[in-house]
Structure formats: C-alpha cells, structure tokens
Amino acid sequence: MGTVVSIELADDLPESSLAALVDDTCAWLYEVDRRFSTYSDDSEVCRFRRGELPLDACSPDLRHVLDACADLWRDTDGYFDAYATGPLDPSGYVKGWSVEVASARLAAGGSHRHYINAGGDIRMRGLNDDGRPWRVGIRHPWEADKLSWVLALTDGAVATSGTYERGEHVWNPRTGEPARGLRSVTVVGSDLALADAYATAALAMGEAGIAWLAKRVADGYESAVVTDDGRAFSSTGLPAAV
Amino acid sequence: MRRSTAAAVGTLTGAALIAGVRLSVSAPVVTAAPPAVDLANSGSSPAPSKKPAHNKEAAKRNGANGGGSAAADASGLKDGVYKGKATDYAYGTIQVSIKVDGGKITSADATYPATGLSASINPKAIAQLKEETLEKQSAKVNTVSGATLTSASYRTSLQAALDAAGA
C-alpha cells in the first residue's frame, strides 16, 4: 500500500532551482523506499532481517533506524514495536524519519520555507507563501472535509494517527486486540519521526494514551486527541492558529 | 513568490508497528516521574512561565540561586535538596526537586501542589489533556494532517484538493 507525498516550497527561488529541489526530495524518498521496503526482498532491511547483512555492514541510516526503534520501544513502554508482526518492520519509524531528513536536505539545498506532507504527517519550515506561519488543519475524525483544529507553525512537525482511514490497524500489545478508545491522535513537536511514533503509541494505548501524552509535553511534544465517543482533548501549549 | 508542488507515490506504508509487551523501564536518574509528596508545601507561588523549566538543569540552577550551603563536590553540586521554581503547566503547577548527596543527584521528584497549604495531590487528574468540545471547522489552511492516507483515499482528501488548487 502506498501513500502520497505533497511538497510545497514557498522560497523566492528561480523555478529551475525549485524544480531541482523537488526532484532531489523525490529521489531521496524513492531511495528510502527502495532501501527500507519490507515488500522487496533485496532491500537492505530484508537482507538484514534474513541475516545476510551483518549489523556492522549495515548503512549508517539503517543503524540509526534500528537504534531509534529500540529507543522508542523503551520510551513507549513497548507500545511502539518494530518487531510487532514478527520480523523486523521499521516502517513506522522510517516514514517520519525519511521526511525529517528530506526537510533537512531541502534546507541544506537552500529552501527554508516549505512543507512536506507524507500522507497526513507533515514537516515544515519557515513561513508560507503569504509570509505567515504555515496553517495546518487537523482532519475531523468523522467528516473528511472538515477540520477539528487549525494550527499555525513555522518550524516543526505534525503527525496524526487514527483509526478512521484504514480501519483497525493498530494493536494493543497488552490485549492482543485492536486498539480501542481513541479515534485520532495528533502530536506536534520538533521531530516528525518521534511525533509520528508517539501518536501511534498513544493510539495503541487507548484512553491511557491521553495521560501518557500529557507527560510528553515536558519534552516539547504537544497533542490533540479525539476519543471514540467524540470527546476532544488538547494540551494547552498546542500551537492553535488565531 | 514561487510555489511548486509535487506528488510522489511510494510503497512506504507507515503501518503501525505495535505489539509486544514491555512494562515500564527503569528511569534514568533525571526523570521526574512519579507523583511525589509536596515536600514542604512551600512551592505554591506560581510564576507563569512559557518556558519549560522543570528539568534537572533548571531545578539545579534555581536551587543554586536559592543558596545551598553544604560543601561543593568536584561535580560542582552542593549537597542538599533543591527545589525548582513552581511553574504553571498545562496540567497544573509543577515543582521539581532534586536531592544532591555526595555531589551527585540521588533523587528527583516532581511535585504537583494544588492550591492551599493542605494541598491534596491528585496527579491522575493533573495528567490529563484538557477536555474541550470537538469542533467542525472549515478554515483556510495550507496543508492537512490526518491518519495516513492510502494512494486511493488521497484522491478524495482535502490535501488533494489543496494540491490541485496550488498546482
């Protein structure tokens, strides 16, 4: 199953430079897909998990991903688990990380005003094309054409995990049942890979995830949650648009 | 003002990788985790601050400003109990204290004083996000965050409409 990545650059740069930046971003995302796909047998991840590639021969990128997954497993009390389905599947970290890296590459290439939205998870920098902070809508969890919050951000990440798009696909490891209790979890912070992992972990926790998210505020990660029965919660530091 | 959009479709699923059981992990010494007793009932002078200051460094600084007395160790930390400034957070007023013994931080606690001297501590209630009403908005936005779209569901999404409008 694929997803769609939308990129917007608001920099005042020549058209050719913008096109080259977009091309470079797409090339990087395709490269990540090739190397980290669990669907293609010759990807680095698949070779590593079959034991054909020893750890010390893995690329620095893969080793970073493995380390990060281990850290997240610990930091989420096991609710984020790259081995959940048996063999290593780091996709839940790789998506956010690849966009995080893509945004850094854009910045290094001269774009300081952009967003990259990978199927609903967003990393942005600088100001939008009106010279204001980027306005990010959080999709209403029941009505696809409505928003439940609107945020304003310059540099940062917004990640949402929810059960409304692909049905029950997140599992509560304590019960072995599909995660229940939360319909939508949005996490806002500096690093998209962490924001995405936190949102997914909280969704898996169910309502206990609300209290868990409250503790992430101290690390700089704000959140907005909608429960299955339609109650909404948000941390007071959520960067709501005015 | 230039604007450029592009869509790329890949096979990264971003599927949730959730399972496996693991109970809580031993926290590093700097974690201000379990709800603690209000050590001295003295911290309830809330000074509104936007800056997250309830980490060990801040507590250490505040403590140092408050003037510890014991001898400084090689680490530069004086023995004693140091309390950070009580700070208003989303979930209540929180104060961090650390205990320094032999120049090392030996314990760290976060206290959640409610109002008054006989503060009843209710960390469970404090550790919630604020409940509000779920609203429906149709405001103008640049981009939309939501549960991961499939290539198919993208076509009917708000984000697709935004991309089409800007292309």
Image (spheres, coloured by chain):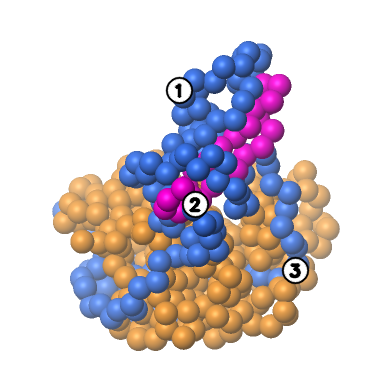
Chain colours: A orange, B blue
In this view, the residue in front, A99 or B8, is: A99
Magenta part of the chain: B94-117
Quadrant where the C terminus of chain A sits is bottom left
Both labels 1 and 2 in a single chain: yes
Q: Secondary structure at mark 2?
A: loop
Q: Position of residue A187 (x, y in %)?
A: 45, 62
- Residue furthest out toward the front: B118
Q: Which residue is mark 2?
A: B118
Measure the C-alpha gap from mark 3 to mark 1.
Answer: 46 Å
Q: Quadrant of residue B56?
A: top right
Q: Earlier in the sequence, mark 2 or mark 3?
A: 3
Q: Which residue is mark 3?
A: B20
Q: Which mark is in front, 1 or 2?
A: 2
Q: Earlier in the sequence, mark 1 or mark 2?
A: 1
Q: Is residue A71 above or below residue B10?
A: above
Q: Secondary structure at mark 1?
A: helix
Q: Which residue is mark 1?
A: B65
